[in-house]
Image: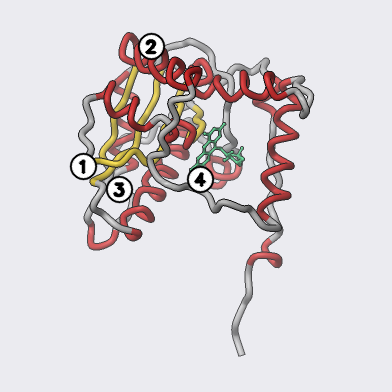
Amino acid sequence: MKDSSNGMSGIEAVTGRHSIRNFLPDPVPEKVIRSILAEAARAPSGTNTQPWLVHVVTDAARDRLSQAVLAAARAGDVNEEYKYAPDTWREPYLARRRKVGFDLYALYGIDRHDMAGRQRAMLRNFEFFGAPAGLFFTMERSLLHGSWLDMGMFMQNVMILARLHGLETCAQQAWCNYGHVVRRELGIGDEYILISGMSLGHPNPEAPENTLISERAPVEQFTTFHSA
Ligand SMILES: Cc1cc2nc3c(=O)[nH]c(=O)nc-3n(C[C@H](O)[C@H](O)[C@H](O)COP(=O)(O)O)c2cc1C
């Protein structure tokens, strides 16, 4: 396969990735999306089951979906596709969530107590943050935990490969709050589950929100080495 990575190292492709929440309208050719998906499909999966089923939206399909989900969100027509999070977050997760959220609001220029401003920022998810392309990752609903692992690996491949093709992404679980609308608009049957959405495009280099580099715990905090 031809290498189109423009000299970006694998380490830079991984460590330089961060979520982009403001994209330029410049289109992404379908050919490039096809390449990213073909390369991403080299992801491992348990016994090579390859559970991923992807829906790509661009142009009129993208705009239609955006309008439908924005309307549902404004009407409060929420219907969680699956339970992503525990009812109560404990530490250290709570503090990490707060930190990234408050850092993002600060870059948006939104006061953390401005609930209407926070809601407006959240709704940008459903405009794909301005990106011309959206990806929706689904699989058969009957599949279990193992296939969720496989889906995560596939999605990560897509995010890294996008960078190697000169593009950026934001994984978006937010769409799953309106999974029923996404599935209805894209003609996806109930036997499939929407696992995540993802915006794909060229980052706006002038957007403050794109400068957010979230923190990570050091290796010694999350790793135990066993040797003796
Ligand atoms: C499965 C998944 C779902 C996510 N959903 C959203 C989302 O709906 N909206 C959003 O703005 N960011 C979303 N994110 C991005 C995370 O907030 C982000 O990855 C995290 O804060 C770390 O920041 P980084 O991606 O810039 O390194 C999601 C990330 C993952 C992995």
Give whichever of 145, 163 is nearer the camera: 145
Q: Which mark is residue 10?
A: 4
Q: Disc 4 on helix, strand or loop?
A: helix
Provide the residue designation for mark 3. Answer: 42
Q: CA distance from mark 2 to mark 3?
A: 30 Å
Between disc 2 and disc 3, the foreground one is 2
Give whichever of 103, 17 is nearer the camera: 103
Q: Report the residue that reaches farthest toward the bottom.
A: 228
Residue 78 image offset from top left, x and y in percent: 44, 30
Amino acid identity at mark 1: Glu
Between disc 1 and disc 4, the foreground one is 1
Few, some or many C-alpha atoms within 10 Å of disc 4 (few <14, some 14-19, many ≥20)? some
Residue occupying the point 70% across, 24% down: 115
Q: Are marks 4 and 3 in contact (CB under 8 Å)?
A: no
| Mark 2 vs 3, N-terminal side | 3
Amino acid identity at mark 3: Arg
Amino acid identity at mark 2: Asp
Q: Which mark is residue 63?
A: 2
Residue occupying the point 64% across, 18% down: 205
Q: Disc 3 on helix, strand or loop?
A: loop
- Which quadrant of the figure has residue 218? bottom right
Q: CA distance from mark 4 to mark 2?
A: 34 Å
The C terminus sits in image quarter: bottom right
Quarter holding ligand 1: top right
| Mark 1 vs 4, N-terminal side | 4
Determine whether, in the image, residue 104 is placed left or right of residue 139: right
Determine whether, in the image, residue 144 is placed left or right of residue 106: left
Residue 173 image offset from top left, x and y in percent: 47, 37
Give whichever of 12, 89 is nearer the camera: 89
Would you say residue 216 is visible in this rendering?
A: yes
Q: CA distance from mark 4 to mark 3?
A: 16 Å
